[in-house]
Image: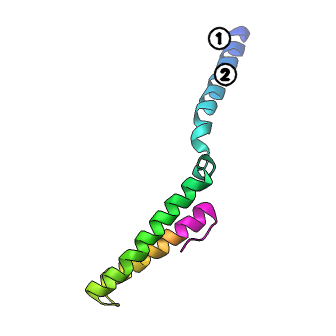
Amino acid sequence: MNLVGKHYAARLWMLSSRIGASLIAPAAVPRAFAESRDEIDEQCQRRIPHAEHDLPEAIEHHRRDSRQAEHERNELHEAREQCWREYHRRWG
């Protein structure tokens, strides 16, 4: 390959890598930036009360120290932690 061909190939490779990066970049935007504050509030305010409701149900039906109650405690903890990790806000 002569010098002109190498120069053309290098420019073509740079152009294609820029196009590829521009197509991938929007997918890398964090979800928190793509959602409005109302959508974030709605998601966490729906997820946490649901988990808070399931815990007493499990305790009532299976005992406080049951495997089911422990599972619901973990679900509630995880829902709260996820809202904090993703949105740095507390609910419930």
Amino acid type, mark 2: Leu
Q: Residue at x 45, y 74 (%)?
A: 76
Q: Quadrant of residue 63?
A: bottom left
Q: Which mark is residue 15?
A: 2
* Left or right: 77 in relation to 5: left
Report helix, strand or loop for mark 2.
Answer: helix
Q: Residue at x 47, y 70 (%)?
A: 48
Tell me: residue 35, above or below residue 87: above
* Left or right: 65 in relation to 88: left
Residue 45: give x, y in percent of width and height.
51, 65
Q: Which mark is residue 1?
A: 1
Residue 20: give x, y in percent of width and height.
59, 29
Q: Which residues are magenta?
A: 81-92
Residue 5: give x, y in percent of width and height.
67, 10
Which quarter of the image is occupied by the N terminus? top right
Residue 70: give x, y in percent of width and height.
37, 82
Q: Quadrant of residue 3?
A: top right
Q: Residue at x 66, y 28 (%)?
A: 18
Q: Nearer the viewer, residue 38 or 17?
A: 38
